[in-house]
Image: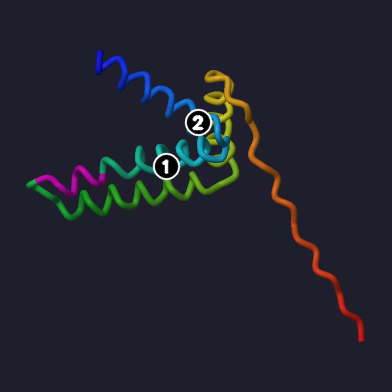
Amino acid sequence: MEVVFDKLISNFFIKKILSTSFLFVSIMFLMKSIFDITTPLSKYLQSQAIDLVQVLVIVDSIRKQLTKLRTNEGAHEILQNAKQFAIDNELDETQLPEIRLRKRKRVFD
């Protein structure tokens, strides 16, 4: 009985968090992408036998992957995955809010 109740509560909070903001979902997909890229290096650095040359190769590979992630194509791919997730889970929003530029008033002498 208690396990079912805990599962209902956790499902409720998950739905509540996910329904609050598409921005939250997008950030979670970005973080997942970053962790997917950096986890192999983290695990390798925690191992007993570390080869310095192999570490440098892995670091260079990760640097290239993170640089690719920072391009428009990488950002577009993350947003597409987040949109698909939002559609599949019937979330309210499927777009990031548009940020308006603030206009400054000019003071003339």
From this view, report whether residue 17 is shown above or below residue 109. above
Which residue is under mark 1? 31
Badge 1 amino acid? Met
Badge 2 amino acid? Leu
Magenta span: 41-47
Q: In which quarter of the image is residue 72?
A: top right
Q: Quadrant of residue 8?
A: top left
- Dot 2 falls on a residue whose secondary structure is helix
- Dot 1 falls on a residue whose secondary structure is helix
Q: Nearer the viewer, residue 80 or 14?
A: 14
- The crowd level at tag 2 (other Cα within 10 Å; few <14, some 14-19, many 20+) is some
Q: Kindly report the secondary structure that dominates the magenta region of the rendered protein.
A: helix
Q: Position of residue 91 (x, y in %)?
A: 58, 25
Q: Position of residue 56 (x, y in %)?
A: 26, 54
* Left or right, 18 with reference to 104: left
Report the residue at 15% width, 47% height from top: 46
Q: Residue furthest top?
A: 1
